[in-house]
Amino acid sequence: MNRSRVRTRPRGPRIPGPRSRPHTLARFALDPARCVLELTRDHGDVVDLGFGSYVLISRPEHVAHVLQTNETKYWRGARAHRRSGGLFGDGLAYADGEPWQRQRRRLVPSFTPKAVAHYVGAMTEVVLAELDSWRGAAREAKPIDLRSGTAALAQNTIAAALFQSEIRDQGADVARALAGLARFVGRAMRAPVFVPPWVPTPGNLRFRRAVGTLDAMMIGLIEEARESGPESGGLLAKLVHAPDPETGELMSDRQLRDELVTLFVAGHESTSNALAWCFALLSSHPDVRERLEKEVEAVIGDRLPTHHDLDSLRYTEAVIREVLRLYPPSWMMIREPRVDDHIGGYRIPAGTSLLISPFATHRRPEHWPDPERFDPDRFAESEIRGRHRYAWYPFGGGPRVCLGLAFAMTELKLTLALVTARCRLHRPPGLPLRPDPRLTLEPAGDLRMRVEWRHD
């Protein structure tokens, strides 16, 4: 009996995209952030990259379709999980279905705005401790390395919230491990050919050592938390002793490890780089910095801020939102449709790697005129009204919106206010500032900055 050939090509109109696959692949590998901007500009709202079943979208309506309206039809996908080397295990980043819902139920109560308010005191102590070293650098007229400074701030802040400690005795080792993990995952996500972590290449061996360093710290902290009561420490102590609201089950050590690594790595990387972008941009925009200083002075004066003050720092928040527009730490998201779907009139077959790029969406001129210009006034209340909900989504959206949104915004506003009240950071003029997409979107180049102490 004759059998007809199975049709494997998608029905309907062909998704537009570049003709030269090798050229596009090379561009994407070298500078993926710039590449997605050029692909969107040249080929429209839905772009077939021409290799590896990758399709790029950036139109807010299409993003809402995937992240919000049809969220149950999509998942994070095995490809992204594999390329992260399994670093996050079955944590919230890659969990799916009922396991994801169960873990989300456990974690949500600890990350509401009300719960995050309890961390403000610990956050303040961390920032003031780091500022002591910056003040010393100002007195000695020595520049600081902004990259390591914001990394220390973010690392110690998330540690203070999770573990009620600054992990000072392990700080240097953990910082090196986190930097190594970011490099590995960033390269793996954009590499034309992926080499699995079990292959003993030099890069993979460094990755495995970094994971081992992080795991050893997490396992030790979990053991300490199990021996103590739920009120003895930070978020970890609560999670160790918190039963699932529906089943009554406690989390296993492996579940705790996966969630801690997800929270620690994602929380550290995203906040560290957002702060670095903040201070670098403020250095080259003294008019914005002056307005920021005036607001902080009017709201806080010479006292330490409380969580109640943060709601009054409207321009401070606008600065942060504009920084996150230009340089969203999670610059690219990946989703895979479980079943065939249609976006913008094009068929998206099940299993396609759908690339969703906040970096590109945040630069669409129909929503952001003169998109490369740094202008916090874009986030004045009068400007926000009428703008599409998914014209700005640095924390994702829909049911899987970033769990740490309230924590991150609180940390960023508090840190920016405390630093602004005490000093100015100056970056030498003329140095280029460009993004370096790794695990998150980092500022590339020389980030040494001179500290000018404002009040002695």
Image (cartoon, rainbow, N blue to C red):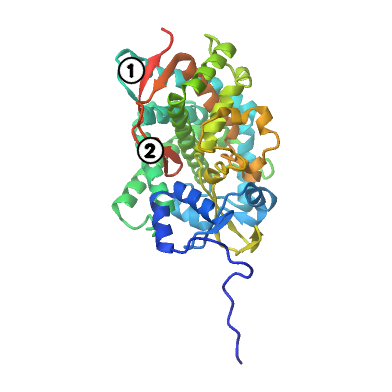
Q: Which residue is at the front of the view, 31 or 309?
A: 31
Specify whether 141 is left or right of 49: left
Instruction: From this view, report whether residue 247 is shown above or below residue 307.
Output: below
Specify whether 233 is left or right of 22: right
Q: What is the C-alpha distance between the residues marked 1 and 2?
A: 23 Å
Q: Position of residue 194 (x, y in %)?
A: 39, 58
Tell me the crowding category of disc 1: few under 14, some 14 to 19, or many 20 or more residues within 10 angstroms, Cα based.
some
Instruction: From this view, report whether residue 15 is shown above or below residue 453.
Output: below
Instruction: From this view, report whether residue 223 is shown above or below residue 124.
Output: below
How many numbered markers are drawn? 2
Tell me the crowding category of disc 2: few under 14, some 14 to 19, or many 20 or more residues within 10 angstroms, Cα based.
few
Specify whether 169 is left or right of 223: left
Q: Earlier in the sequence, mark 1 or mark 2?
A: 1
Task: Residue 241: name its quadrant.
Answer: top right
Query: Residue 131: in sight, yes or no?
Result: yes
Q: Which residue is at the front of the view, 277 or 268?
A: 277
- Quadrant in which the C terminus appears: top left
Residue type pointed to by label 1 = Ala
Q: Which residue is at the front of the view, 94 or 424?
A: 424
Q: Residue furthest bottom?
A: 1
Instruction: Using the image, tell me which numbered label, if any, was put on residue 444.
Output: 2
> Which tag is nearer the camera, tag 1 or tag 2?
2
- Quadrant in which the N terminus appears: bottom right
Instruction: Read off the residue under disc 1.
Output: 137
Q: Position of residue 182 (x, y in %)?
A: 41, 43
Q: Residue furthest front?
A: 370
Q: Position of residue 198 (x, y in %)?
A: 36, 56
Residue type pointed to by label 2 = Ala
